Image: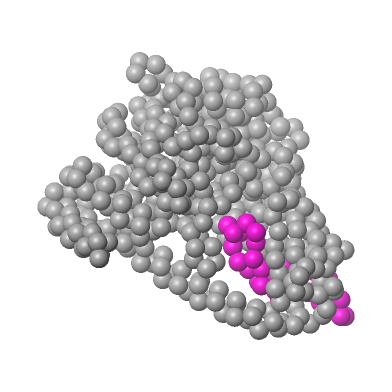
Amino acid sequence: MKKIFLLLIVCISLTTVTQAQHADRSKFIRDSLDLYISRALTNWRVPGIAVCIVKDNKIVLIKGYGIKELGLPNAVDVNTLFMIGSNTKAFTATALAMLQANNKLSLDDKVTKYIPEFKLENKFAGQEAAIRDLLCHRLGFQTFQGDFTFYNTNLTRPQIIEKLGQLKAPYGFRTKWGYTNAAFLTAGEIIPRVTGKPWETYIKEAIFAPLGMTNSLALSKDLPKSLNRTVPHTLTADGRLTPIPYCQVDGLAPAGAISSSASDMSKWVMALLNNGKVGNRQIIPQAAIQATREPQDIVGSVYHLNGENSFELYGLGWFIQDYSNHRLVMHDGGVNGYLSSVTLSPQDNLGIVILTNTDQNELYEALRWEILDVYFGRGYRNYSEAYLKTYKAHAATEQQSERKLRDSVVLNLRPTLPPTAYTGKYANSFYGSMTVTQGENNDLEMRFEHHPTMFAKLQPLGGNRFYVTFSDVTLGKAIFPFTVQNGKVTGVKVKVADFVEYNSYEFKKE
């Protein structure tokens, strides 16, 4: 009863808040944001979030909400670390632009000037690609292409660059935008060729230390060692929120390995909005900041919930779009168990940082627009509720499909061939090798060469189709169809969650 009474108080308060916001939106940040976020954390099932708003070179709000790990009372504070995923890309692009401003390189230099071994399957693209092309995703690849091979694997940076050269791009060089994490890695690996220092060292010395970002980490391997850190979370197939292992993405570090806090990110954002200055010190050359914000390519059109349509462009490590007659420089970041957003409105000297420790939420996105609307004088829309309605409808559809598959598994439908016929070694010319072995209850188990800690369990659905669950739940749920010719298994199609890669992989049985 006490919980019900408290819930009624919250609902009444939110109704009052909504009415008040229509009258005076300027009070939303000061008077209502805490309540808004507290409710959203519950509705979105987000364990913890850190939020920072800076305006006119001052911190308007900086605060942690919720907890670091489900089931434990440790509260998020302004110094608590979250992985920021692809918000790392702006650091990499800025670092290279700083080297250009200091006449150490040109962003229009060919990649092969610094990495002679760099090659692409499109020979012309490999010869002509400039550093700038790596930083704005226009090599001709499809978004996320190759990332199942590159992401959270045991491949080293040189190995990833080499494998990128084997990947066949579906589009012509500089003809189509396609988000390419391995290209950002390649760009980051130019830094040690110029400075003699690894990417992570240069980022710490050139950006973190001068800005006072004393808690930030450049590599994912260091996050578990930190005392004040969040734990990553996701939702399992049956809808349970659960902690998951930290991803290891140091092979792609310049594309997504940084961990930071609201406090440290406030220093980064304020420097970017203040033309690179901290007080009287010029930490980041103004020319470097401007270079990253120059549009390089068209991403596509964007539809906003308020009815606006605009084009989305890409600079160097930043998305660029117009919203309500304001130019936004922004990026989102996502890795296993984390989602984040960083948004700048340079003409308003406004910056917003939102960090969350689950990869199953759109609160980081909704909150961005809620705060922007406050400063741009727009009416209250409650984006969190609008996004949540769509999210729940999509989740319900997925869960229904999942239940049907689980029901099919319970029927114990026999495969066309004996389980042993599917076992053995398989190979994909790009990925490498994979093996299938037989486990208990005739279930099959699949293990991949470059994912040594991950395995997939295969349960028969009848015919030559198998229902697949990964030990790494972020890889999603799937159906793997095996190909059979003349009574023999010849291959299998492997597909992981779109969160990692859209493309499937054809493995041939050896």
- With 497 as the anchor, is 395 left or right in this view? left
Can the viewer see residue 15 in this picture? no
- Toward which corner of the image does residue 57 lie, by quadrant? top left
Q: Is residue 362 above or below residue 390?
A: above
Asked which quadrant contains residue 39, the reply is bottom left
Q: How is the image coloured?
A: one colour
In the rendering, at what x and y percent does residue 404 appear? Answer: 56, 79
Residue stretch rendered in magenta on the structure: 465-493
Can you see residue 392? yes
Viewed as shown, does residue 57 lie left or right of 330?
Answer: left
The image shows residue 90, relative to residue 106, as above or below, that is below
Question: What residue is shown at x 64% (from left), y 30% (from top)?
Answer: 190
Q: Residue visible at 49% across and 66% down? A: 239
Q: Residue at x 64, y 27 (%)?
A: 198
Q: Relative to 178, is 163 on the left or the right?
A: right
Q: Nearer the viewer, residue 15 or 274?
A: 15
Residue 411 in percent (x, y) is at 66, 84
| Most frequent secondary structure within the magenta stretch | strand
Q: Position of residue 285 (x, y in %)?
A: 45, 22
- In the rendered image, residue 47, in percent from the top left (x then y), is placed at 42, 51
